[in-house]
Amino acid sequence: MLLENLFGRKVEGKKVEAIERHSRTYTFPGRVKRDFGSHLPKIEEGTILDAGCSDGHTTRELSELYPRCHVIGIDCNKDSCKHARGLHNDLEFHVGNFYKLSDNFPPDYFTAIFAMNNLTAVSHNLSRRELLAIFDNFNRSLKDGGYLCISDDIGWDPKLAILKKKGEEFSEVYVSPIFRVRNTFGYMPEACGIKR
């Protein structure tokens, strides 16, 4: 099996297996509330993206947490999306690369983007230039005042960042202390404007 990332590099073998295992292991009902808890942004209406939705459990949970919002799941794995559609046939799922949202959605489209584990899992393998391009893509896809919600739950405590789009930049709403210093995130905190 072979995957191609945003920048055309081929990902093969054990890395693909790790990505697939990761997407099956870290998605489950209750994940959003458990990771973000009281820090979940208040969103009354709009469109929310579950970036890297896997089998759609987190997409379902987002639709329940934000009942007046339109929630969309996107995943690069077509089998995961097919499975998600079977489990949650009342929700919308797209096969696509959430690092290239402009392939599927117009600019300023989303009120919030949730990226749980999928971004942090690969951040240490990406260069500063690649991460800046990903966050620029998120910025273009979010409405002004929209939220970018990132979490990583590997280990005992969730590491999370909730950022709000202000013009061409993100401002911090909440960033867990460990998210600022965790070395495995590589250039990600810098790319999205988190102060170390």
Image: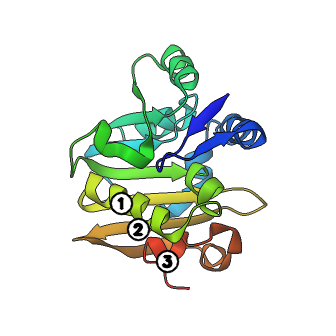
Quarter holding the C terminus? bottom right
Residue 184 found in image quarter: bottom right
Residue occupied by mark 1: 147
What residue type is disc 2 on? Leu
Residue 108 falls left or right of residue 181: left
What residue type is disc 1 on? Tyr
Q: From the viewer's perspective, is residue 64 above or below residue 175?
A: above
Dot label at residue 104: none
Circle 2 packing at 10 Å, graded few (<14), some (14-19), many (20+), is: many
State the separation of the CA atoms marked 1 and 2: 6 Å
> Depth check: 99 or 154 in front?
99
Residue 38 falls left or right of residue 31: left
What residue type is disc 3 on? Glu
Residue 83 found in image quarter: top right
Q: Nearer the N terminus, badge 1 or badge 2?
A: 1
Tags 1 and 2 in contact by the CB under 8 Å rule? yes
Tags 3 and 1 in contact by the CB under 8 Å rule? no
Nearer to us of marks 3 and 2 is 3
Residue occupied by mark 3: 190
State whether residue 2 appears in this view.
Answer: yes
- Mark 3 residue element: helix
Q: Residue at x 47, y 50 (%)?
A: 7
* Location of residue 63 in the rendering, given as x and y in whole percent from the top left corner: 41, 36
Q: Residue at x 64, y 60 (%)?
A: 125
> Depth check: 168 or 178 in front?
168
